[in-house]
């Protein structure tokens, strides 16, 4: 019996109250044991709607932002999704329940191996993990129906636009500040043109790498 079930139910109700409408997204959050994705001393706090530290100066995002970004990127069933910034692996797990396959890239070796092992133990077999710089994407299996960047980018990395399918969406926190960003969604239309929509402010740790902030930032 999952001791955290009640806490998770309350979180899902809170997310619904905060405006998350897609029941499949809420169902996925109901299924993923978030407490397995945080350091053990934070297990009891992890069903609050808050970002939490996961080590190496990084964070697991606030559940509302995970739910909102999932809702924005999940535009159809059986998607092939690329995530930049695996972190704890939680967002990848939430997406895995809704997609055919999730490709996820993490830059920091410790977080990469922890997340990879965790996702394997929890049997998220349709998540493929890679260690490296996600700003250059994952060319080999491109194009993707959806791309989700879960770190704050100064601008959209050009390779990610290229690796997006026509009719696909790219969800990204973007902006010139290192401490907060605008949550933007880019849709690639059939004729190749790009449409942009903004969904307000958010706060992510910086996206580093070739098409991100400088490594030292
Ligand atoms: N999605 C995560 C939270 C992401 S925190 C979760 O559900 O827990 C942002 C992550 O992006 C950090 O782990 C950071 O190391 C990683 N990151 C930053 N720049 C990156 C890059 N260029 N490529 C891959 N990962 C990157």
Image (cartoon, helix red, strand yellow):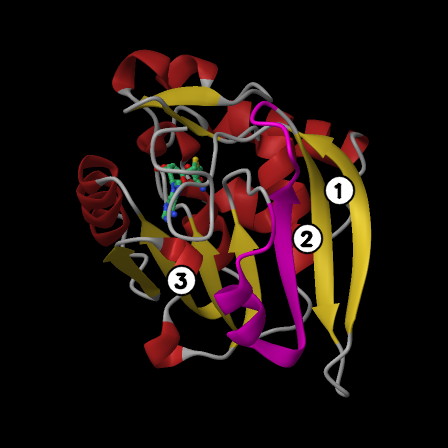
Q: Is mark 3 within 8 Å of ligand 1?
A: no
Return the residue at label 1.
Answer: 20
**Residue 194 x/y as whole percent:** 76, 71
Tell me what residue is drawn at x 32 percent, y 57 percent: 124
Q: Is residue 187 visible?
A: yes
Q: Are marks 3 and 2 in contact (CB under 8 Å)?
A: no
Q: Nearer the viewer, mark 3 or mark 2?
A: 3
Return the disc, 1 or 2, that comes first in the chain's sequence: 1
Ligand 1 found in image quarter: top left
- Tell me: 137 left or right of 23: left
Q: Are marks 3 and 1 in contact (CB under 8 Å)?
A: no
Return the residue at label 2.
Answer: 71
Q: Is residue 162 above or below residue 214?
A: below
**Residue 172 x/y as whole percent:** 61, 49
Start-end of magenta stretch: 155-179
Tell me what residue is drawn at x 81 percent, y 54 percent: 197
Q: Which secondary structure, mark 3?
A: helix
On-image quarter of the N terminus: top left
Q: Nearer the viewer, residue 174 or 170?
A: 174
Res 136 label: 3
Q: Is mark 1 within 8 Å of ligand 1?
A: no
Return the disc, 3 or 2, that comes first in the chain's sequence: 2
- Tell me: 105 left or right of 11: left
Q: Nearer the viewer, residue 216 or 162?
A: 216
Q: Is residue 96 above or below residue 205?
A: below
């Amino acid at each position: 019996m999952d001791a955290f079930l009640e806490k998770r139910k309350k979180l899902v109700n809170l997310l619904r109250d905060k405006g998350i409408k897609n029941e499949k997204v809420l169902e996925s959050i109901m299924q993923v044991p978030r407490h397995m994705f945080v350091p053990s001393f934070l297990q009891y706090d992890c069903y609050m709607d808050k970002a939490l530290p996961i080590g190496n100066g990084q964070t697991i995002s606030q559940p509302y932002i995970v739910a909102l970004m999932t809702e924005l990127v999940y535009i159809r069933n059986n998607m092939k999704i690329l995530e930049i910034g695996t972190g704890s692996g939680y967002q990848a797990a939430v997406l895995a329940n809704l997609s055919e396959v999730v490709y996820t890239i993490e830059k920091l070796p410790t977080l990469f191996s922890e997340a990879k092992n965790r996702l394997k133990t929890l049997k998220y077999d349709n998540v493929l993990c890679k260690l490296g710089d996600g700003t250059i994407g994952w060319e080999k299996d491109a194009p993707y129906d959806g791309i989700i960047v879960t770190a704050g980018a100064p601008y959209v990395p050009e390779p990610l636009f290229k690796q997006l399918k026509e009719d696909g969406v790219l969800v990204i926190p973007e902006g010139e500040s290192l401490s907060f960003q605008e949550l933007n969604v880019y849709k690639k239309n059939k004729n190749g043109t790009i449409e942009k929509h903004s969904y307000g402010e958010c706060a992510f740790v910086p996206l580093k790498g070739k098409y991100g902030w400088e490594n030292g930032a």
